[in-house]
Amino acid sequence: MSPSNRRTPQVAVLLPSSVKVCRDMRRGILRYVHRHGPWGLHILEGRDGEQKLFHMKEWGCTGIIGRPDSDGMQRMVQNAHVPVILMEDPKGEFLNKSHPLHRHSIVQSDTEAIGQLAAEYFIKNSFQNFAFVGEINNLWWSVKRGRAFAKRLTECGHHCHIYAGLPEAEQRDAGIEREHLCEWLRSLPKPVALLAAMDNRARQVIDACNWSDIAVPQEIAVLGVDNDIDLCKNANPSMSSILLDAESVSYEAATHLDQMMRHNIRRRRIFIYGPSHVVSRNSTAHANLNNPLVNNALNYIRNNACSTISVTDIVRHVNASRRLTELRFREVLGHTILDEIRKVRLENVCSLLKESDLSIGEITTQCGFESNSYLGVLFRRTYGCSMRDYRTRTCPPAK
């Protein structure tokens, strides 16, 4: 290794590409490297056939960041004798003080805050019945998420129906589980607001509802977690989800790893990421409203807000007078048709800021706004920060 290469950090990144939150974490790490690198990187995605990194010392490894899932990978990390930052593992093993990797810094989720946010989102939308569907193996983060969801509901005087743990055969095979899930969904009081532990599970719930002729969102409103764009936008109907702030906290973790590598610091830190906000789509879109005219208009807005639609287009679609349509909007939602169009467009702006590398100008056009300056003023007034700041540091959701 040349002297110049010896000064460049050589970092192993261990994050499975199949997991949405891990992809967000990797994006945060790479954003740090782009701004403050260079780092030499070997990225392990958990794919079959990918090139491993069993001999880290020979490779010149100076740091490790990620999720070592297998026992062999954990032993490799333990024996590497370099700064390590662990990304939260599904089983929660690294949180146990007896675990040999416990001494390292760790990034973990505030999974309880996610459940609380989901409860408050549904309560705000006037639901009275609630349900939770957890991860199939009842992993710790899913159990805590469901308990926090149910606890917040209980505090507000509501009961939560919990989809019970699955027998081993149903854990292994979705085909075997489907009828059990469908039967449980049919048994729920309607309308009901349902939180699923993650997007892939929420997608299964929506598919089971379609299989059982249960209307989503009219009978069951479904909310997922992670905001996996491909899963959410291609569900039928499109799926609402909670966006997590894993990317920005991973940027902070990469900063800490860089300091440990360059200055020989060995200081354990805990990095916590929580929910950013709910990205609302059709699976929860005003499902609890009992006004067909407003529901019809809202569905049209959700599907077309980012094209050049106007209030006139909405009125024409619902086949009612503008005065009546505006009146019903104010009665049911407390704001105008134009306010709703802007709200949906801004939600799409937020998603693109967090999920894409599109420029501000491209996002402005794609979300149906006429100018960057107008969108910039509206965004700051709504979220309290600029779009560039939002992209790097999650802002609170609009009130």
Image: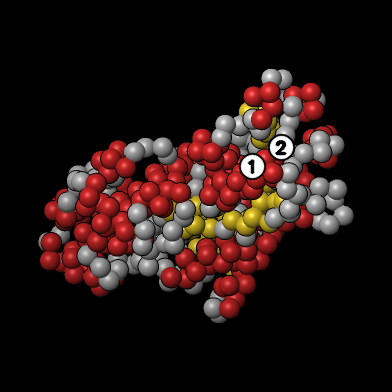
Instruction: Report the label total.
Output: 2
The numbered mark, 2 or 1, whose residue comes first in the sequence reads: 2
Specify the quadrant that holds the N terminus: top right
- Report x, y in % for residue 319: 16, 55
**Is any part of residue 90 visible from this angle?**
no
Q: Amino acid at mark 1?
A: Asp
Helix, strand or loop at label 2? It is strand
Q: Amino acid at mark 2?
A: Gly
In the displayed structure, does residue 184 sit left or right of residue 305?
Answer: right
Which of the two residues, 362 or 194, is positioned nearer the viewer here?
362
- Report x, y in % for residue 159: 59, 73
The residue indicated by pointer 1 is 258
In the displayed structure, does residue 229 sit left or right of residue 61?
Answer: left
- Report x, y in % for residue 264: 73, 44
Height in image: 327 above or below 212? below
Helix, strand or loop at label 1? It is helix
Per the model, the C-alpha gap separating discs 2 and 1 is 8 Å
- Report x, y in % for residue 56: 78, 28
In the displayed structure, does residue 285 sit left or right of residue 55?
Answer: left
Q: Residues within 10 Å of mark 2 (few under 14, many from 20)?
A: many
Which mark identifies residue 63? 2
| Residue at image coords 47%, 53% | 393
Q: Are dots 2 and 1 in contact, CB under 8 Å?
A: yes
Which of the two residues, 4 or 71, is positioned nearer the viewer here?
4
